[in-house]
Amino acid sequence: MQAVKSPLSLLDPGESSPFWRSPLWLCWLGLGCALLYAGLRLAAPDVGELAGTLMALGGLFAVLRWGRGIRSSGALWFLLAVIVVQLLSWVGGYLHHPQWMTDTPQLDRLAKWFLFIGLAWWLGGSTRATLLAWVLALVGLMAVVWLIDGNLTHWQLGLNGRRVDFGIRNAQHTALFFGAALIGLLCFSRRCLALGRMAWVRRLGWGWAAGSCLVGIGITQTRAVWLAMMVVLIMMAAVIALHAYVVGHRGRWGKPALVGVVLLFIAVVASGWWFQDAVEKRLEAERSVITQAMEGDWKEIPYSSIGNRLLSWRASFDWIAERPLVGWGEEGRGLVIDHTDWLPPQTQNNYGHLHNTLLELLVSYGVLGLLVMAALVAWVGLGTWKAWRAGVMPSDMALFGLAYFVFYGIVNQFESYSFFWTGTYLQALVLGGLVTHIWRWQVESGQRVFPVLFRRGS
């Protein structure tokens, strides 16, 4: 295979060939499906989902067939582990409560969290290909919220105080995309705002997208995203300041950082003033509910958004305690809602899940499932750190990875994003970009993320 004909070589001339190889026609097909998945999963769901399936299956096959030094890495072992955990949970549930189990184990429920393996393979360790996939995802989001008929009305209603969702499942899931996109735009702002070719186009595009996301976060009125963004912005500012101090780039970072902070402060203050009434109503409505729960007054908790969440969370603790190791199987969240006698009808009729990814994971797959996912997060986090320290992963990408994990970890405590297609899509995009750089670092250095656990080729 001639390196110059590789699609990655065309995208990134500075890198003469991919860092791992598969047949040329398969490279074109795989990367094409990956970019279609990134750009069209929101704007054209049927096409994007088909492309994602081909990307994932083709990528997994390619890793196993040609991924020497990669196929024995942590990501593949964790995929195998979640399959085993789901089988154990299904077998245990079939022996304990067969009337509540499906006829066959639904292994794709957690396996879908590993779509990033296929994306990481087709990105080939290329920073430019990764950024292209993320830009296409942003363009897809902007197309959905601006170009689909009727969405201008959504913007008008939102600016008038109504909660809107732009047709993306519900407002919470739309807010998730707006929040993740805004974090990415802030982390990569230096690239977008720098001088050079098509600078004004990049700057206008960045300003339009950042403004849309900031306003979108306001009009989707999702308190978990507001909380997560506040924490992430403070953390990002602290990390950037610390990095500038340690590295000693005060002159290089000072002016851009100051301008960025001032502009962001003005935008946040303006948005806060505009959406003051909506924010106050959303926060005040649940303050008394939280106080009642903290005081142990569960009988009088109203059946509001937070009230129903607290009731279902409390119910889940009893189910987790009964089967803590392997959980209740893939239908666990439904069992908590439908078969907890003391839950009020309002909660049972209006809620089908627990609005908390951590609790749903524990209810369905127990501590074993939680340990596997915690190990995956640790592997990606440590791998990102090592790839960045080695100069393989750019600093802004590493910052985005850190900010994303904090943001996504917070919002998943209030909604089960990871168990919906919206969460698996976002996970695939972000983790795929990070893991492709981790694999590249492994291939170049011959080192492993977890050297003790994975001794061969990881």
Image (cartoon, rainbow, N blue to C red):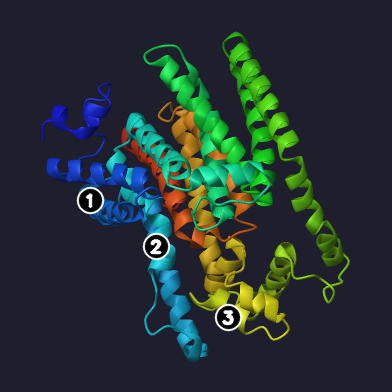
Residue type at numbered disc 2: Ala
Q: Residues within 10 Å of mark 2 (few under 14, many from 20)?
A: some
For disc 3, the marked residue is 335
Choose top left, top right, bottom left or bottom right for residue 335: bottom right
Q: Is residue 248 visible?
A: no
Image position of 214 with respect to 377: above or below: above
Query: What's under tag 1, amino acid-wise?
Result: Ala
Characterize the local packing of mark 1: few (<14), some (14-19) or many (20 or more) Cα atoms within 10 angstroms: many
Image location of residue 45, percent across then percent down: 36, 54
Of 145 and 317, the residue lying toward us: 145
Asked if residue 109 lies left or right of residue 410, the reply is: left
The residue indicated by pointer 1 is: 62
Q: Which comes sooner in the sequence, label 1 or label 2?
A: 1
Q: Residues within 10 Å of mark 3 (few under 14, many from 20)?
A: some
Q: Residue at x 38, y 57 (%)?
A: 77
Q: Quadrant of the N terminus?
A: top left
Residue at 48%, 74% (x, y): give it.
330
CB contact under 8 Å: marks 3 and 1: no
Q: In the rendered view, tell whether residue 245 sits above or below residue 313.
A: above
Give coordinates of residue 438: x percent, y percent.
40, 39
The picture places residue 123, in percent across and down from the top left corner, at 31, 39
Classify residue 4 by image quadrant: top left
Please give the name of the residue rendered at 67% of the width and 44% of the height, measured from the top-left corner: 160
CA–CA distance between discs 1 and 2?
Answer: 17 Å
**Who comes first in sequence, dot 3 or dot 1?**
1
Quick one: SS at disc 3? helix
Q: Amino acid at mark 3?
A: Leu
Q: Nearer the viewer, mark 2 or mark 3?
A: 3
Q: On the image, numbered disc 2 is attached to which residue?
A: 111
